[in-house]
Image (tube, helix red, strand yellow):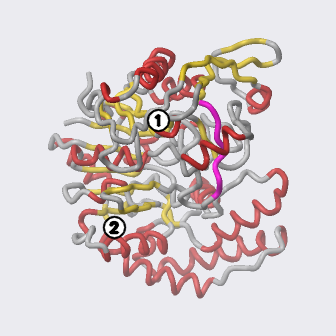
């Protein structure tokens, strides 16, 4: 048995979908443990692109069972549409290959409306949410008033819950935000249909998972977003509404911490983020635009252009600490080809003092000036590289320097969007 948690080591959008897809042939189960359809994982196989928002990225491999754990918040309409698209392509012939926890909380109309209304009310102080209702759904969950997947299977009992919540939410929508109210009857009609269509997929995913572990099967846990979007450990308040770090795999999937063997942090060879908040290494000039265009840095969920800049080692060291990383996957190193020099931020200067520690407060991060180390670039096209030896010397030195600074081995290197465009220096599932 081996268990591996794959998590984002930056602000999300690190290419987790590709890495999880690449690792999935070794996994019997792939488990999504947090977030919602604010995540977008892009997979490219034989030139065909698949974008997944809720279903785990292991679904393209026939040998995997894919679990959506209780820590995920689920938009049932979006999940059904995603499942329909997969079935139409012949990918999902057996519904037993996707199991949804009955304990996962449901995103409904009022959650989406409140997300959009609150973001508009913030004006210049907007956080930059996706407007998918993720935050308000986690809010209802923590306030113990949420609706769960299992509730959709009991429409008679659901009516009282929906009517009570609609009255409460409509007061905020109309009186505070001057927004259109939601309609209880329309929601009830949709939830009945949601329950009917999702019933074949609903299960006790915690039992499935723990049975698999007892049987010695391999399990891959798939994180969404990234370490610095974690509600506790990220750049608050410019964060998501769930815990994205590796420890959340335990609570969000339903296993004990002693069951986790390894943690793979996934990072780009540079840094990006979407939405507001400080970004010390951001480049708002020609370099940032070049990285954006060459790296196709536009959100898979929203289409928003991503902010781009040099690799931030201060962040990666913090991610290694918070997650307990045992290895790194470095994506999009091919995008750096053609740059004469590369810079890596190895420290920050804050209020005149240099530090290699990630600051605790948003104000300190906003004042942080990166301290850069310069490395030589390379001109070679890396897209055909499949072995470590195929990379030019400068690219290997870049990877070696990242390893030395973060003190975590780079086990996988991605040189393109396709599944096969991956260099494996060691096996993240098996590395000692």
Mark 2 and mark 1 residues within 8 Å of each other at the beta carbon? no
Label 2 sits on residue: 202
Residue 303 vertical placement versus 85 (above, below) = above
Q: How many marks?
A: 2
Q: Position of residue 79 (x, y in %)?
A: 44, 69
Q: Quadrant of the N terminus?
A: top left
Q: Secondary structure at mark 1?
A: helix
- Nearest the viewer among 275 and 298 is 298
- Outermost residue toward the front? 379
- Among the 4 quarters of the image, the one containing residue 143: bottom right
Q: Residues within 10 Å of mark 2 (few under 14, many from 20)?
A: many
Q: Position of residue 133 (x, y in %)?
A: 62, 63
Q: Residues within 10 Å of mark 1 (few under 14, many from 20)?
A: many
Q: Earlier in the sequence, mark 2 or mark 1?
A: 2
Picture disc at residue 13: none
Magenta span of residues? 304-310
- Nearest the viewer among 422 and 165 is 422
Label 1 sits on residue: 333
Q: Position of residue 18 (x, y in %)?
A: 38, 48
Q: Is residue 374 magenta?
A: no
Residue at left offset 44%, top offset 67%: 149
Q: Nearer the viewer, mark 2 or mark 1?
A: 1
């Amino acid at each position: 048995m081996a268990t591996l948690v794959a998590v984002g080591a930056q602000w999300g959008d690190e290419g987790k979908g590709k890495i999880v897809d690449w690792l999935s042939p070794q996994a019997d189960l792939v488990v999504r443990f947090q977030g919602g359809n604010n995540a977008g994982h892009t997979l490219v196989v034989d030139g065909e692109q698949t974008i997944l928002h809720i279903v785990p990225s292991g679904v393209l491999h026939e040998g995997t069972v894919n679990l959506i754990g209780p820590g995920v918040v689920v938009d049932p309409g979006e999940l059904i549409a995603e499942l329909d698209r997969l079935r139409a392509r012949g990918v999902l012939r057996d519904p037993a290959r996707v199991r949804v926890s009955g304990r996962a909380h449901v995103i409904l109309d009022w959650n989406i409306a409140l997300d959009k209304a609150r973001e508009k009310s913030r004006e210049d102080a907007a956080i930059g949410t996706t407007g998918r209702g993720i935050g308000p759904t986690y809010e209802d969950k923590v306030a113990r008033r949420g609706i769960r997947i299992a509730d959709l299977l009991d429409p008679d009992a659901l009516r009282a819950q929906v009517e009570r919540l609609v009255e409460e939410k409509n007061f905020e929508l109309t009186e505070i935000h001057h927004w259109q109210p939601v309609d209880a009857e329309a929601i009830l009609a949709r939830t009945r249909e949601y329950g009917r269509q999702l019933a074949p997929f609903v299960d006790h995913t915690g039992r499935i998972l723990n049975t698999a572990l007892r049987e010695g099967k391999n399990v891959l846990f798939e994180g969404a977003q990234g370490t610095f979007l974690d509600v506790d450990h990220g750049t608050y308040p410019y964060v998501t509404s769930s815990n994205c770090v590796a420890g959340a795999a335990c609570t969000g999937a339903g296993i004990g911490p002693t069951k986790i063997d390894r943690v793979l942090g996934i990072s780009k060879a540079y840094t990006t983020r979407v939405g507001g908040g400080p970004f010390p290494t951001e480049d708002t000039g020609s370099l940032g635009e070049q990285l954006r265009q060459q790296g196709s840095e536009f959100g898979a969920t929203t289409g928003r252009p991503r902010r781009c800049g040099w690799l931030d080692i201060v962040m990666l060291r913090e991610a290694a600490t918070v997650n307990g990383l045992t290895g790194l996957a470095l994506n999009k190193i091919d995008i750096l080809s053609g740059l004469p020099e590369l810079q890596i931020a190895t420290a920050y200067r804050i209020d005149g003092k240099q530090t290699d520690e990630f600051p605790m407060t948003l104000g300190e991060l906003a004042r942080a000036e990166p301290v850069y180390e310069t490395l030589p670039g390379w001109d070679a096209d890396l897209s055909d590289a499949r072995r470590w030896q195929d990379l030019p010397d400068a690219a290997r030195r870049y990877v070696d320097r990242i390893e030395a600074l973060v003190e975590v081995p780079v086990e996988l290197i991605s040189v393109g969007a396709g599944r096969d465009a991956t260099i494996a220096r060691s096996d993240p599932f098996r590395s000692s």
